[in-house]
Amino acid sequence: MPTPLVVGNWKMNPPSIAEAVALAQALRAPLGAVEGVERVVCPPFVALPAVADALAGSPIVLGAQNVHPQPKGAFTGEVSGAMLQGVCSHVIVGHSERRHSLGETDDFVNAKVLAVLGLGMTPVLCVGETLEERDAGEASAVVERQTAAGLAGVEPGDVTKVVLAYEPVWAIGTGRAATPETAQEMIGGIRAHLVRLTDSATAAQVRLLYGGSVNAANAAELAALPDVDGALVGGASLDPDAFVAIARAFATRA
Ligand code: 13P
């Protein structure tokens, strides 16, 4: 069983760099003390250097919320993987808020996965269906398509360097997490896809996260699921007590 992983996606929060530093400082001691789980926080780009300073020497590592696949060039407003090297170890790619609000395609997400891997960082590849797709009975097909497309061109030996996060769009920010049955069914489906892509021993080593309204109250039941190796947490990652409780729930998983 791989080491569990909890990732806090701060999204466009908190509203200032000073508050991001204060959040990191509040997390540093209690989250740093939770052993047996990898801990990643993903602040907004502009807060990354200040949060890196605030967490220097702690076991909490940094992730970025996005990346552009090209190494440099005329891409106004974008940030390359090379710029993130040395600051971040993880990069979220394919978040549904970017797929749906900003029109990111499967191909573009795949290019990001390959770029991040090529730079020796860990992509956290997000997949997940909308409510409309679920109601139409297409949830598994959508997640299978996003997983296959996102991993296209990844060498079988590199699949364990990718983290996948199943985030059903209808569960994000709604307070309505997937039931344990749905989370296990969908994430188990991703694991089965990885077995077909590689082999069962390799697929078992890939970290598969659940995301969507994870909180201190539901973390333990999610952590108990056989295929859920961690959580990608939005709103609750802005509350130090809640995020530490979520990390503790996954730390006791093994
Ligand atoms: P919430 O935890 O706020 O539902 O957000 C989930 C998410 O989108 C994490 O990437």
Image (cartoon, rainbow, N blue to C red):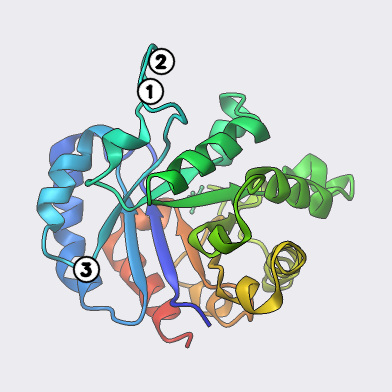
Q: Which residue is mark 2?
A: 75
For residue 81, which quarter of the picture?
top left
Picture disc at residue 78: 1
Q: Are marks 3 and 1 in contact (CB under 8 Å)?
A: no
Q: Residue at x 44, y 29 (%)?
A: 68
Q: Residue at x 57, y 79 (%)?
A: 221
Q: Are marks 1 and 2 in contact (CB under 8 Å)?
A: yes
Q: Which residue is mark 3?
A: 59
Task: Give the crowd class for mark 1: few <14, some 14-19, many >=20 residues within 10 Å.
Answer: few
Query: Eyeballing the image, is 191 above or below 41?
Result: below
Task: Measure how far apart labels 1 and 2 are at the Cα level.
Answer: 6 Å
The residue lying toward the viewer, choosing from 131 and 150, is 150
- Counting from the top left corner in percent of width and height, residue 170 is at 66, 47
- Counting from the top left corner in percent of width and height, residue 159 is at 57, 60
Q: Residue at x 31, y 58 (%)?
A: 239
Q: Residue at x 17, y 49 (%)?
A: 52
Drawn side of residue 110 relative to residue 231, left or right? right
Three-letter residue code for mark 3: Pro
- Counting from the top left corner in percent of width and height, residue 23 is at 20, 52
Query: Eyeballing the image, is 162 above or below 46?
Result: below
Drawn side of residue 186 relative to residue 253, left or right? right
